[in-house]
Amino acid sequence: MSDPTQPDDAAPPDAPVNDTPVTDAPPPSADQVKLALRKVKDPELNLNIVDLGLVYEVAVDGSEVDIDMSLTSPGCPAGPQITGDVERVVKAMPGVTAVNLKIVWDPFWTPDRIEPRVRAYMGL
């Protein structure tokens, strides 16, 4: 006899769990991803990573997002926090099931990559 508290189509408790996110939303555009990345700040400078010029490339392939970015230096102490925030913010976007984040050092980041209006604000 079946358990009346469980739906008839409930999976058995020992059934494998599917960890793949399911989404019916269309994938975001690269511009939408860049807009979302403005929420990620370098905690030392309190500026978003897009204005800092740390995001080099964003590509969307179906529900997967590929991001090439850099840090202000190879030994950046905020690196793990920044990369974790990037993955968290992008994975939370509707239509995204995977984020492939690649830290690149070519070209090496310099303050010249900072948005001109932000550079002016900083007095650079």
Image: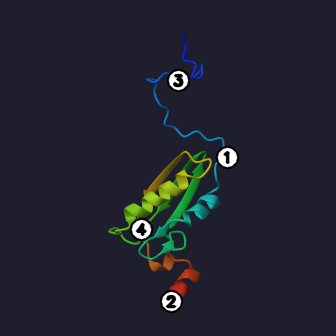
Measured Cα–Cα span from mark 3 to mark 2: 61 Å
Residue farthest front in this picture: 4
Q: Amino acid at mark 3?
A: Ala
Mark number for residue 11? 3
Determine the secondary structure under disc 4.
Answer: loop
Sooner in the amino-acid sequence: mark 1 or mark 4 = 1
> Residue at point 58% right, 19% down?
4
Sooner in the amino-acid sequence: mark 4 or mark 3 = 3
> Residue at point 35% right, 69% down?
76
Measured Cα–Cα span from mark 1 to mark 4: 30 Å
Mark number for residue 123? 2
* Picture colour scheme: rainbow
Q: Quadrant of the N terminus?
A: top right
Mark 1: few/some/many CA within 10 Å (<14, 14-19, 20+) = few
Taking 77 as reference, is 95 left or right?
Answer: right
Circle 1 is placed at which residue position? 26
Measured Cα–Cα span from mark 4 to mark 2: 21 Å
Determine the secondary structure under disc 2.
Answer: loop
Q: Amino acid at mark 2?
A: Gly
Residue farthest left in this picture: 75
Q: Amino acid at mark 1?
A: Pro
Sooner in the amino-acid sequence: mark 3 or mark 1 = 3
Sooner in the amino-acid sequence: mark 2 or mark 1 = 1
Residue 79 lies in quadrant: bottom left
Measured Cα–Cα span from mark 4 to mark 3: 45 Å
Circle 4 is placed at which residue position? 71
Measured Cα–Cα span from mark 3 to mark 1: 28 Å
Mark number for residue 83? none
Measured as percent of width and height from the top left, residue 42 is found at 45, 70
Measured as percent of width and height from the top left, residue 23 is found at 61, 41
Mark 3: few/some/many CA within 10 Å (<14, 14-19, 20+) = few
Determine the secondary structure under disc 3.
Answer: loop
